[in-house]
Image (spheres, rainbow, N blue to C red):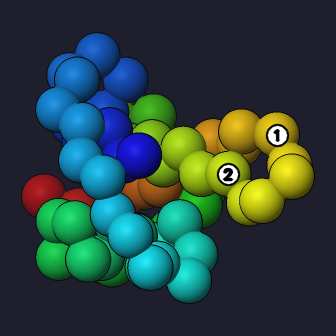
Amino acid sequence: MLTAGGETDGQEMMVDSASSPEDAARKAIDEVLVRSGRRSDLRVRVYYQYPDQALSMVRLYAKAIDRD
């Protein structure tokens, strides 16, 4: 599950067959994101779960050259 819009906005999307959280974000919002950045550059939180493992979450941020 991918939650777009940063920490407070709650638009959720489901993405199947993504190879990584970054790939899921690219498929969902057509944006290349990275795992580190400033809080103000937060774009999405990606929740994922591999078989027989716990649910995990990563925050993805706009790349420095892509900032508005």
**Disc 1: CA contacts within 10 A as few (<14), some (14-19) or many (>=20):** few
SS type, badge 1: loop
The image shows residue 49, relative to residue 15, as above or below, that is above
Give residue 53's position: percent from left, percent from top.
Answer: 86, 49
Q: Residue furthest top?
A: 8
Residue marked by disc 1: 54
Q: Amino acid at mark 2?
A: Gln
Left/right of residue 16 with respect to residue 19 in the rendered view: left
Q: Residue at x 24, y 37 (%)?
A: 12
Residue 29 sits in which quadrant?
Answer: bottom left
Left/right of residue 37 with respect to residue 2 in the rendered view: right
Residue 37 visible, this orientation: no
SS type, badge 2: loop
- Disc 1 to disc 2: CB gap under 8 Å: yes
The image shows residue 1, relative to residue 65, as above or below, that is above
Q: Residue at x 59, y 61 (%)?
A: 35
Q: Which corner quadrant holds the C terminus?
A: bottom left
**Residue sitting nearer the eye, 11 or 14:** 14
Residue marked by disc 2: 49
Left/right of residue 50 with respect to residue 68 in the rendered view: right
Residue 36 sits in which quadrant?
Answer: bottom right
Q: Amino acid at mark 1?
A: Ala
Give residue 59's position: percent from left, percent from top.
Answer: 53, 46
What's the CA distance linking mark 1 and mark 2?
A: 6 Å
**Residue sitting nearer the eye, 61 or 57:** 57
Q: Residue at x 74, y 60 (%)?
A: 50
**Disc 2: CA contacts within 10 A as few (<14), some (14-19) or many (>=20):** few
Give residue 67's position: percent from left, percent from top.
Answer: 23, 62
